[in-house]
Amino acid sequence: MILRLIFNKKNYLKYIGHLDLMRLFHRSFGRADIPIKYSEGFNPHPKFSIANPLSLGIESDEEYMDLDLEEKIPVEEFMEKMNKVLPKDVQIIKGVYLEKEDSIASLIAWAYYEISFDIRENNSKEELENIFNQWLLKEEIIITRLRKKGKKKIEKEENIRSFIGNLLVKQVKEKEITIDVLLRSGGNGNLRPNDFIEAMNRDTNLNIDLDSIMMKRLSQYAEKDDNIYKPL
Amino acid sequence: MIDKKILDGILKKVEKPARYIGMEQNSVIKDLNNIKVKFAFSFPDVYEVGMSHLGLHILYNLINEEEDFVCERVFAPWIDMEEEMRKEKLPLYTLENKEEVKNFDFLGFTLQYEMSYTNILNILDLSNIPLLSKDRSDEDPFVIAGGPCAYNPEPIAEFVDFFVIGEGEEVTLEILNLYKRHKEGIWDREKFLKEVSQIEGIYVPRYYDVVYNEDNTIKEMLALDPEVPTIIKKRMIKDLDSMFSPEKMIVPFVETVHDRVSMEIFRGCTHGCRFCQAGMIYRPVREKSTDKIVELAERLIESTGYENVSLSSLSSCDYSELHLLITKLMERFEDKKVGVSLPSLRLDSSSIDVLKEIEKVRKSGLTFAPEAGSQRLRDVINKGITEDDLDNTVSYVFKEGWSTIKLYFMIGLPTETDEDVMGIRELAYKVKDMFFAMPKEERKGNLKVTASASCFVPKPFTPFQWMGQETIDEFYRKIYLVKNSIKDNKVTFNYHDPELSYLEAIIARGDRRVSKLILRAWEKGCKFDGWSEHFKYDSWLESMEELDIDGFFYAQRNRSLDEVLPWDFIRPGVSKDYLIREYKKSLEEQTTSDCREQCRGCGIVDCTMLGGGNK
Ligand code: SF4
């Protein structure tokens, strides 16, 4: 019985790492008496997975989890029980039982982020839009990433242009900028928002104050025949 | 409240930021504006270590249950965090309300090991609180300290405004209530301190002066005020069932050393091992009833969601109704997948019975502590374990499928010879041979025997408190004697740094003058001394040289039985007479049996084991 969930992760809890979050959920299932399924074998573990782990320090309005239950319990009851034992900054927002679906981890293809940061000089919204458009006209935006190959770490160059989707200037308050941007995420290419901002800072003259960057994941999408849709 | 924007910027840069955010399940956030007394509790080490300490969970809940009081936590920030905080001038804050430590009424440290003392200074400094008690004013919190190391408070007497000697459950609330009363009247810092010094178990160092002899030993300790006590008696809870026991524990987000419910089942220990300070200062044994334990364990499992209960005490197999207790717990938790475990096992037959009960749940490595390699030396230290005990237990656990065995030893015990030291190797090899003596089809798993040796540190209030510590050279010689003789890949030998144990010995039996050394070492950048990668031995040596402090005098010198010891004014329950008797017996290789068999007259007044409460 697969239950797909959307939950959020806010405020200080953005500093909880993926494994710690998994443990938090595991314990919370126990405390809320949720009949969760365990894997077979010598060292049984609870069957649930969180898609597309967030990096430390990023908030989220929309995280996805698939959870395998021994028996169906009404979604409302489930949410009420869970939200009571979960911290107020990690709460379940929505849940739906699935008929037959691909796992959430394999579905997620894009993530939509809100990123705000300070830049050195005042720019108007139009000027900024111009700068970004110019930048995105390039066919190649190359970044180097460290890849593990066996035990060695090797540097690899990668063109991330196709990993960047829509970019929207949402708000400009003097030097404080907020943008929304769609980035590829998951198995078929993945661009971390930190790498994106670094590349943008490198290729434009904005002089972003790196300490001021705040990020939040707004939503995540699956992709089919060039259309993106929410997996729930 | 501190600047949260700055904090946010810092947290993005440091390792494991979840250490610094609080917000855990069962943590308590009160509105500080409605609070009469604010208490900041500090375990002077990194978050994960501090959160594994049971005493923290007890005091935290005890204080927070009072409407007028609040207890918030503060730990030693790790090196990277400290660097960022200093760079951004962010003061140390409590995890709950992110309030500056300096704005609290009390900052209370728990003293679990001497090598955390530099962290105390670092915490004070990061909180902008003057390091020396004499420099503090009404602007500053009272810096107080308790825990096992407080039984010799003198090495940090200059930093701490007052100490709490003994068990804290009752006296903490007495202190906070007294403070509240004083705050409601006309506040006078001096008057409060004087009154606090009258509470049993409290030691206010500033009311005493120490006079030294020409040979640097202590001549006498003078009370500077006729009203303060000349003898400080430890505090002790008589009845554990009616004492405050928490029904909640904070559940950290990050993994800690003990990710489980820690359930205290009794206090004290009857074995009388002569090296063990805890075994002496926590006497007599006082048990919680099985019903109470089961009830509390159930509440704790409920409130935490943990899947394991660890029955904690100095020697859990000694609980008088252990069998009944474990059966009851297993029954209660059977369908909840909750396991029961014991943190320490003795190498005797009672352990086997317990193992039979709990093995159903989990089968990880087993740890035993013979402490010394030969029977002769085990008699000297009164560790009542025989070769037969080891044989029986180990062959049993091998048959049952355990294959990872850890053995703990000490090197440098009084009267130790090379033969005794080599006994460590002999025991480890014997365990290995027992494994391979089993028919092949009965062997389960991959054998791994680890023998770990720490370097013996003589501690106050033990029969060995008069003994000199082994020199560092001798420690190394003995360590290598064992190490070089072990040539089997199934047997691993680990040892602790003698340098660290040497400093521990200096501080553990230090007097007031050692405060200067700790301060100087901290000024030279010492902190997290207990973490070998951060231990700066050279800085400590330099500090001693600059201050003309003789390490030999504190660590390696044998004291005569009539010397005035720096901690003599504290009464831990066991009498000095008893310690002297045990000291003499140890030199004659005579053992003293468990005092549940027969009272040994250790000096406890109104001992609850003799008629009161526990059998
Ligand atoms: S007074 Fe006797 S029974 Fe009580 S702890 Fe001391 S030796 Fe044991």
Image: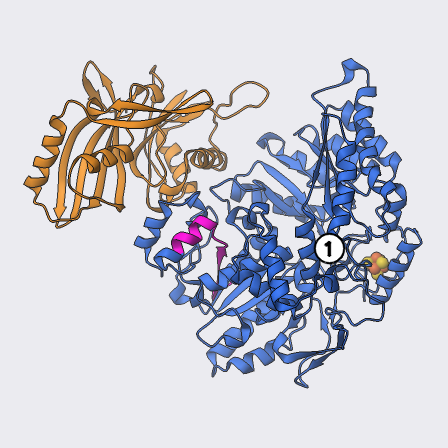
Chain colours: A orange, B blue
Asked if residue B527 is positioned above or below residue B356 in the image, the reply reads below
Asked if residue B6 is positioned above or below residue A131 in the image, the reply reads below
Q: Quadrant of residue A93?
A: top left
Q: The disc labelled 1 sits on which kind of residue?
A: Ala
Q: Position of residue B496 (x, y in %)?
A: 68, 44
Instruction: State ligand 1's quadrant.
Output: bottom right
Asked if residue A223 is positioned above or below residue B473 in the image, the reply reads above
Nearest the eye: A160 or B271? A160
Q: Residue at x 67, y 59 (%)?
A: B148
Left or right: A132 in relation to A91: left
Q: Quadrant location of the N terminus of chain B?
A: bottom left
Q: Position of residue B417 (x, y in %)?
A: 86, 46
Left or right: A10 in relation to B193: left
The question of residue B366 being in magenta is answered with: no
Q: Position of residue B493 (x, y in %)?
A: 72, 35
For disc 1, the chain is B
Left or right: A222 in relation to B51: left
Q: Position of residue A210 (x, y in %)?
A: 26, 44
Q: How many marks?
A: 1
Instruction: Tell me where the magenta segment starts and ends, as one range.
Output: B66-85
Q: Residue at x 46, y 72 (%)?
A: B140
Asked if residue A223 is positioned above or below residue B465 in the image, the reply reads above
Q: Residue furthest bottom?
A: B226
Q: Is residue A231 visible?
A: no
Q: Residue at x 50, y 60 (%)?
A: B122
Q: Is residue B507 visible?
A: yes
Question: Alpha-carbon neighbours of circle 1 within 10 Å: few (<14), some, or many (≥20)?
Answer: some
Q: Quadrant of residue A189?
A: top left
Residue pointed to by mark 1: B278
Mark 1 lies on a secondary structure that is helix
Nearest the eye: B419 or B7? B419
The question of residue B78 being in magenta is answered with: yes
